[in-house]
Amino acid sequence: MAIRILIADDADLTICGIQTTLQEDHRFEVVGTARSMDELLTTITEQCPDVILLGEWLYNMDILSGIEQLRKLVPTSKIIVLGSLADGLLIRDLFHAGANGYLYKSDDLCDCLTLAVDTVLRDRKYLSHTANAEYLVAMQSPQRDWHLDREARHILQMLARGHRTCEIAESLDIETRRVYHIRQKLRKRFNAETNEHLISVAAAEGFIYP
C-alpha cells in the first residue's frame, strides 16, 4: 500500500519541488496539495494522509496553532514542518505541539526528504542537519523548559494589536502580574528588549498575523 502524503505550502515552487522528489520513490503517493490553512483543513478530512509536509507560512494562523488544530483532526497523521528558521527553541515548541519532524529549507532536502518520511512513520523524530544542530544547542538553554503555549501566543497577539497590560489581563481573566511575567518570557524567547522589538521579531517568524 502506498504511503499517502499531503503537501501544504504557500509557494507553488516548493510544492512542485517536493512532488518531483517524492515521485522518484514508487512507495509514495501525493494525495493532495494545499496553499492555505483553510484548504489544508478541507483536504485532510477528505484524504486522511499518512504524512503531512507542512510549510511554516499558511495564511492567518501561526505554525504552532496550525499543528495543534491538525492534531485534533488527524491525530494519527505524521507532521513534518518545512521551515526557513533554524531556531532550536521553535523546533522544541513544534515537537511539543505535535510535530514529528522539521526540515530546514536551506539544507539539502533532496537528500533527506525520503529519510524524514520513513523515520517519522517509525514513530521517531527527524531533524535535518542544521535543524538538529540548533535543537541540540537550544536544549542547553535556560529557556528550554518554557513553551510558547496558547496563552503566551494570545498575549503576544494582543500586544501587537496595541492592548495595554490591564486590558489583556481582563480579557484573559488572569492577574496583571502574570501578563507582565509572560511578556518578559516572550522578550527573552525572541531576544527582544522592548515591546516594539518583540512584535517585530515575532511578526518575522509568523506569530503576528492580521
Image (cartoon, rainbow, N blue to C red):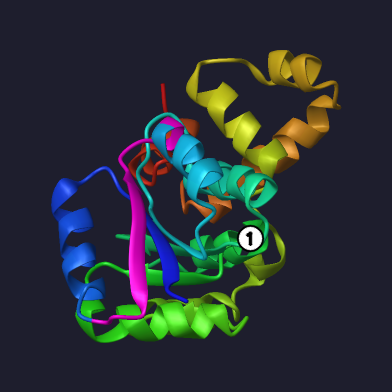
Q: Is residue 99 above or below residue 195?
A: below
Q: Residue at image x 49%, y 50%?
A: 47
User: The residue under label 1 is which amino acid type?
Assistant: Gly
Magenta residue check for 184: no
What's drawn in magenta, residue-wise?
25-38
Magenta residue check for 28: yes
Q: Is residue 125 above or below residue 78?
A: below
Left or right: 63 as drawn, with respect to 99: left
Give the labeled residue for mark 1.
98
Q: Tell me, yes or no, if residue 113 can be seen here.
A: yes
Total marks shown come to 1
Left or right: 82 as drawn, with respect to 208: left
- Residue 184 quadrant: top right
Residue 60 location, x and y as percent?
43, 29
Residue 62 location, x and y as percent?
48, 40
Q: Residue at image x 37%, y 39%?
A: 58
Choose between 175 and 57: the one closer to the eye: 57
